[in-house]
Image (cartoon, helix red, strand yellow):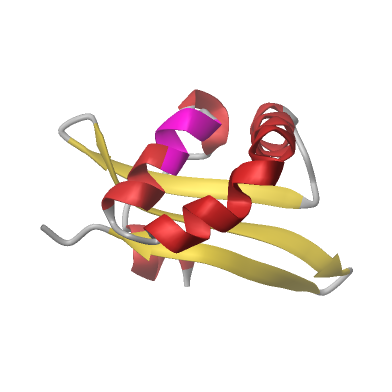
Amino acid sequence: MVKNICGEISSSSNMNFERIFDFYKKINFIYPSKEEAMSPYFSEISDVWEKLLKTDSDVFVFFHKLKDGKLTSSVCAAQYTDNSWLIQHATGDHD
């Protein structure tokens, strides 16, 4: 499924939350009222995302695709049980 969303994919090693959040806003995954609702918790959200992206984890993955150096699609997943993953934030910019 990840390959269908992202095509040739890369892991999170060169991503940071600011870049991801800017992408989410650009494609309206984070729309103005959602951003406003997140604002009281933004520091905590950012901290958790940065930790997840920097940790070599067996329970969280973030994959993305770049085109001409720009983020074009992404998906993240967390391990839910030994045999299943919860996929979240499957996004894409199809300009």
Q: Nearer the viewer, residue 10 or 46?
A: 46
Q: Is residue 82 visible?
A: yes
Look at the image and say whether residue 19 sits in the magenta stretch: yes
Residue at 28% across / 49% down in the picture?
Answer: 26
Q: Is residue 3 left or right of residue 82?
A: left
Q: Is residue 51 left or right of residue 9?
A: right
Magenta stretch prevailing secondary structure: helix
Magenta segment: 17-21
Relative to 41, residue 47 above or below:
above
x, y percent for residue 85? 72, 69
Relative to 14, residue 62 above or below:
below
Q: Nearer the viewer, residue 17 or 3?
A: 17
Look at the image and say whether residue 78 sits in the magenta stretch: no
Q: Is residue 30 visible?
A: no
x, y percent for residue 33? 46, 61
Direction right: furthest residue: 82
x, y percent for residue 2? 47, 64
Residue at 45% across / 41% down in the picture?
Answer: 21
Q: Is residue 28 left or right of residue 49?
A: left
